[in-house]
Amino acid sequence: MKLFRTFLLLTLMLAGWHSQAMLVSKQAFEIERFTTENGAVISPVKVGWEAYGKLNEDKSNVILITHFFSGSSHAAGKYQQSDAAPGYWDAIIGPGKAIDTNKYYVLSVDTLVNANVFDPNVITTGPATVNPATGKPYGLSFPVVTIGDFVEVQKALLDSLGINKLHAVIGGSMGSFQAIEWATRYPQRVERLIPVIGTAYIDAWAAVRLERWAYPIKQDPAWRGGDYYQHGQPEQGLTTALAYIIQDAVYPTGFNMRYPAPETDKAPHRDILASFSAWEQLMAHAKLRAKMQDANHILYLVRASQLYRAGMGDNWQQALSRVQAKTLFLPATGDQLLLPEMAQASVEAMRAAGKQVEYAEIPGIWGHLDGVVGITAVADHIQNFLDKE
Amino acid sequence: MKLFRTFLLLTLMLAGWHSQAMLVSKQAFEIERFTTENGAVISPVKVGWEAYGKLNEDKSNVILITHFFSGSSHAAGKYQQSDAAPGYWDAIIGPGKAIDTNKYYVLSVDTLVNANVFDPNVITTGPATVNPATGKPYGLSFPVVTIGDFVEVQKALLDSLGINKLHAVIGGSMGSFQAIEWATRYPQRVERLIPVIGTAYIDAWAAVRLERWAYPIKQDPAWRGGDYYQHGQPEQGLTTALAYIIQDAVYPTGFNMRYPAPETDKAPHRDILASFSAWEQLMAHAKLRAKMQDANHILYLVRASQLYRAGMGDNWQQALSRVQAKTLFLPATGDQLLLPEMAQASVEAMRAAGKQVEYAEIPGIWGHLDGVVGITAVADHIQNFLDKE
């Protein structure tokens, strides 16, 4: 625990906790009628977005940041100086930082079905949204949406801003899927691609692992087949799902620094129903997160993630052959969720298609989470890659 | 799938599928009154055991095999030539094999609360056992039992046979806990110790991961707080738990050879409630296993595993300093359940206490499961280690 506090403090310091933060604000974007990849119509779609830095005259300095499963468009800065923490990649986004807002116009968009739908700083459309046609939340009548749909919403926003070229698109985890989909779908628009803790495909193993996040929600009687909005969240199921997400994103070394070892507990030896402190603390941690989140949104994010493969067709390797962007894959060495092997297979497929691809690993004890908390380890690499012609 | 079938065939061939199998039989052992580590009394305790080879005159050629979570004392041979498969380590146990039954008397015992309580070849005592005092299954009135208790039952059997020295104790996974506990608790009796895919302690991460196996059972309404014996198993919860156990024991490379990739499925893109074939096939596989198993037994095995640390006290490192056995740790390189780091930390603790410890990794694509299906890769190492004075 002591080590973890030191680590947290260091992170906060690196993140500019003691200095003045870059102040940012949330903006809203609306599409009156959005047709999903599936052919369904969502009317309207609203999403939030943030931008840091200044758009240059020829609109050629744009970097798009695509966010991870549990994240939002709040990638950097603070809304107010008093905020407890800045956006998740504040360590690398800002004036003079690796993604230099003195140079680049950095833009980030809340996804459809964003997990944090009850966070006042998140704007999203999903099953918890009231369907104007019925006056009630969509629930499971909301269509299955895909990473491709997330990209189309972002593209509509960029089109509305007159931006038709991206200096780079960078995203972590589920954000890497969006980044890769951008470069696959709109190769002429994307000059540089950086998938962080990412992969160009989800395999059977990862799809099943993701299904295990959905399972506790669907098993909670309070989920009521997805139609719980009059009764309140299936809190137990949602909390459990979030606990699993936390654990799956953290390598054991980091996890064991954060949660107490079993030998500190006596009750589990006496009582088969007693819990270990590690479990209880993890659940308490997850319960705090659950306050901002919606159970159905988690199901939809799980599904969007499970369905991902570059190009969204039957052959992700072939789809990658369309990419024109210079590419840098940055998996985390200890990642047990999206394994470095997945990034390696993605790189191999691109190289086999004659693409120029760099690969480097993020070291650390946090596993998948090193793509967020350990990102400074590859800050120079990112900076050099962005600045190269 | 093709590769997997080839692999299965190879395994079966290596396991002697095409040759005559060593015929073995199950024996029963009973303790009239067994007092657990916890101070509870179980009366009686019955367990099954098997032995291969011949006990020599001075009873000095005994090798004890301790089994893994989902396993039983059926470590080698077949009950009848027509059995579909031999015992799980048949590749290394038998006449002329690494654990040579021409030389050694190899003995294996069903644990308390064995998972496969409805397998006609398993004899165990646990929550599904009828409590003679009430005429009803124990259910959750069965006391929490520990790896130490498993060892005490085995010791009682060995005592009854007049065996007071083990040439070696060898076990995989949960069997490694028992093996280490033997060498820690009875250092004078154990000459060689081989923990396979093992560790001398369970940390917070592993305890939580194990808790996730218990969760679907406890969430199944058919579990009825553990008191389901009049109504039938909580089949959905039990099946899900077993599915998670299967996945957690298999490295993604192997898993993806066994189960179909998500892009083969169309329904999950159309319907948020549709499942992927990989999930359905895994659940079908688990459902077959569930027929032999009892949900409460899984909960008790989870707990016994969670509670394990060498010596069962507050300081497993110190407990290891009591070990006198020559020791060989054999983790699997791709193990994502009991990581090689755990074996390494166990080795370091023993070396720090001046112990002689060897370490080698089992290579393979199956991860934790390589401790079973990939064991031939370290057969020579085991054989040399056993034969060394």
Image (cartoon, coloured by chain):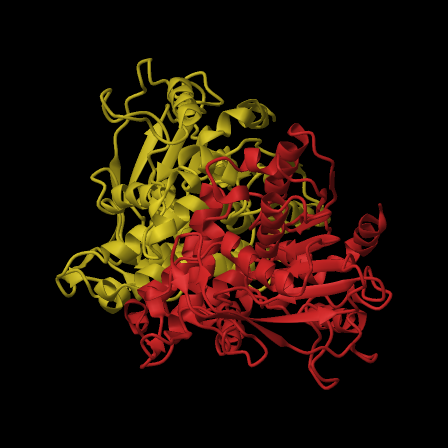
Chain colours: A yellow, B red
A370 vs A276: above or below: above
B374 vs B13: above or below: above
* Residue A387 on image: x %, y %: 56, 23
Quarter of the image for residue A21 reads top left
Image point (73%, 53%), residue name? B168
How many numbered dots are placed on residues in this image?
A: 0
B365 vs B19: above or below: above
* Residue B89 on image: x %, y %: 71, 65
Nearer to the camera, A149 or B169 = B169
Quadrant containing the N terminus of chain B is bottom right
For residue B109, side relative to residue B298 (left or right): right
Image point (53%, 33%), residue name? A365
Whether residue B166 is visible, yes or no, is: yes
Quarter of the image for residue A233 reads bottom left
Whether residue A327 is visible, yes or no, is: no
* Residue B101 on image: x %, y %: 81, 66
Quarter of the image for residue A193 reads top right
**In the current view of this chain or complex, which residue is farthest to the top?**
A19
* Residue A378 on image: x %, y %: 55, 27
Image point (59%, 40%), residue name? A325
